Image (cartoon, coloured by chain):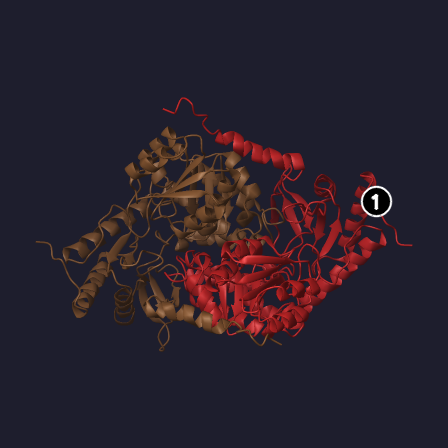
Chain colours: A red, B brown
Amino acid sequence: MSDSTARPVDYSRVFTQAIDRLHAEGRYRVFIDILRNKGMFPNARCFAGHNGPMPITVWCSNDYLAMGQHPKVIAAMEEALHDVGAGSGGTRNIGGNTHYHVDLENELADLHGKEGALLFTSGYVSNEATLATLGKILPGCIIFSDELNHASMIAGIRNSGCDKRVFRHNDVAHLEQLLAAEDPNAPKLIAFESVYSMEGDIAPLAAICDLADKYNALTYLDEVHAVGMYGPRGGGISERDGVADRITIIEGTLGKAFGVMGGYIAADQTIIDVIRSYAPGFIFTTSLSPVLVAGVLASVRHLKASTAERDGQQASARMLKAMLAEVGLPVLPGDTHIVPLMVGDPVKAKRISDILLAEYGVYVQPINYPTVPRGTERLRFTPGPAHDEAMMRDLTKALVDIWNRLELELRKAA
Amino acid sequence: MSDSTARPVDYSRVFTQAIDRLHAEGRYRVFIDILRNKGMFPNARCFAGHNGPMPITVWCSNDYLAMGQHPKVIAAMEEALHDVGAGSGGTRNIGGNTHYHVDLENELADLHGKEGALLFTSGYVSNEATLATLGKILPGCIIFSDELNHASMIAGIRNSGCDKRVFRHNDVAHLEQLLAAEDPNAPKLIAFESVYSMEGDIAPLAAICDLADKYNALTYLDEVHAVGMYGPRGGGISERDGVADRITIIEGTLGKAFGVMGGYIAADQTIIDVIRSYAPGFIFTTSLSPVLVAGVLASVRHLKASTAERDGQQASARMLKAMLAEVGLPVLPGDTHIVPLMVGDPVKAKRISDILLAEYGVYVQPINYPTVPRGTERLRFTPGPAHDEAMMRDLTKALVDIWNRLELELRKAA
């Protein structure tokens, strides 16, 4: 059948080699099989071992405020489930546009003080679809992107076909240098995040907006690690800093602080209408289940009014950072709820994580490339309002034990 | 501030012009705001008018078998909601890998007789992420794509960076001609669908597999409009035709016949591992809510054992096609559950749909470009097991009335 001179491709070998490369680099990922216990977060069960479910404490969840367990959220989802059923049954255009979707978009537009909002099936898709579509609608647009932007923004920028200029992380002077070097008449878009999820630092929003004004650039701000958690109503860093009206497009997630699933953008109605009408990743996909949308509605409304969750989270993060620093563990400083502990090696990061789970019932994943640059591998803790002081003492002690055992350096404060 | 010789971009004008183009072409989309009544599908409520919700019959849902309303699905989701809460709280690698996800992947692998399966947040993402990643793992790969492939496959192929050859719809001779023209040593992938959702026709799976064998090509089959509905256990056309083991990767959705939300692929374990480890659209996104996953598990298990829904759907589709053809309405022939009624003009398709909703309480969306090629605009009915004969008579009568009113042609059978 095949040409006698041909050496047919051995697909199987190509695929196996791709996996072997990951093992060789020590960054092959094993997913830990867990079940959370509703109402008892951060307690959960782990199915990784062989002796039935083992109780664990979750330290790496992005359900930052435990809203995924909030009675109002659960009740709203249960009601929707019984009222309209499991799925939406179609794309937004063909049968999948429910009243829940319309209400939630209005709620999110209000949260950010924008004319409109648009739901996507995930934050990843929000970023990819919006940036790719914007770039196509604005021929010749140049996109200025922070070097630590999330993979979904990078994908959207690449798929936009636009020229890209990468500025050093949170470096406004470098951004200005790049903006000034381009044709003043070319369309420009600055794409950045507010809270960077792996560093736990915050972008200088007002200064970036000043540059956008000066160079007539649009701004695209990813607030997925900030919405629900910053600002008086949970509108993110742009609300906290009073600059939401200066950001062209604010993007957020429904799957982290809001505790459910999905993503969105908020912007002027015309921009919402353009993305709604042109983005394949929005048009050609079944809309979010109304059950999820109902849960998010309850969550957003609750966090607009309640600050207890935000205050509790900040207090927990401060306490944990202080405890880790006190014993000399290499915690990255910062003013956010994210607590990165630097390891700098993929194999060691995985080893620490494995020991924590197996011996201490502590669940925190190693963060390796491609999630962070090589050489900056780390553990990333996300204490929430429900992580108490006793849990933090246990965690700190476990980490010190392991650090000693693996002969890693502790930098004791003087 | 701005350069005095510069003409700054007027972003607002660019965006408004993009929307104006859609209005000018008659394909600006208005989403109909509806709520389904659980347990009473296809009955629903519409919020489009000004006098409160109006009762309607849904004729365009992709919840083909009404599994989104099935008591087993609802019960499973309610149980998960109370057991583990609303969202997964993270990516599959970081806190979002629950026991439900593991179980469902095993169930889907079994459904297709494959070693493994992998969940995505949507069918769109499954296609985009898998095809883009495959293309990158196989340098020099040439992708052979049916001309009517879904937008998500087209996006994945484009983002793979591979060379693409488009073969005429379901045309095996043309596909062979294209395969034969390429270097026999080059990696090759044939990407196609089983049931084409807008035409309602079926690809010649076995013949395409023969070509794949002959030319040493991988096969990628989108079964989103077939899983749950064809094959003795709902494994799709590949199960019905007994060729599942000859397809390299089978892709499906959890948001159509299974009634919930999400997407997946099933394949050999090595391929699953490659996509799991390399696809940004899988890695960098919050995993499906365990509530959804629990509902899908119940749905897949039910449809593996029960054929009543499939039989009812096929009977409904045959009956509706016969009724429409009898009065001379331009229904597209075909052996599937999809009933396309050709209009050939975007403005008329929208007008018919508007009248059906406003005057007859019939909800069916116009299908215009870019969902179908220009000049082939249509209405697309998806009768399911719960659409009864009386509903079909009412629908047929309404369509004949409108066809006469708009002076469209009825081709009466002799």
Confirm whether residue B87 shows in the render: no
Q: Residue furthest front?
A: B5
Query: Residue at left 26%, top 71%?
Result: B359
Give left or right: position of A337 versus A87.
Answer: right
Q: Which residue lies furthest to the top in this view?
A: A4
Residue in front for this viewpoint, A93 or A44: A93
Q: Where is residue A258 in the image (x, y as percent from the top left)?
A: 59, 62
Q: Which amino acid does label 1 sit on?
A: Glu
Measured along the vertical axis of the image, is residue A412 above or below residue B144?
A: below
Confirm whether residue B230 shows in the render: yes
Measured along the vertical axis of the image, is residue B100 above or below residue A284?
A: above
Give left or right: position of A381 versus A99.
Answer: right
Asked which quadrant contains residue B51, the reply is bottom left
On the image, numbered disc 1 is attached to which residue? A409
Quarter of the image for the C terminus of chain A: give it: bottom right
Residue in front for this viewpoint, B53 or A204: A204
Q: Where is residue B292 in the image (x, y as percent from the top left)?
A: 49, 52
Query: Residue at left 36%, top 35%?
Result: B179
Residue in front for this viewpoint, B220 or B177: B177
Q: How crowded is mark 1: few (under 14 residues within 10 Å), some or many (20 or more)?
A: few
Residue in front for this viewpoint, B55 or B261: B261
Mark 1 belongs to chain: A
Q: What element carries label 1?
A: loop
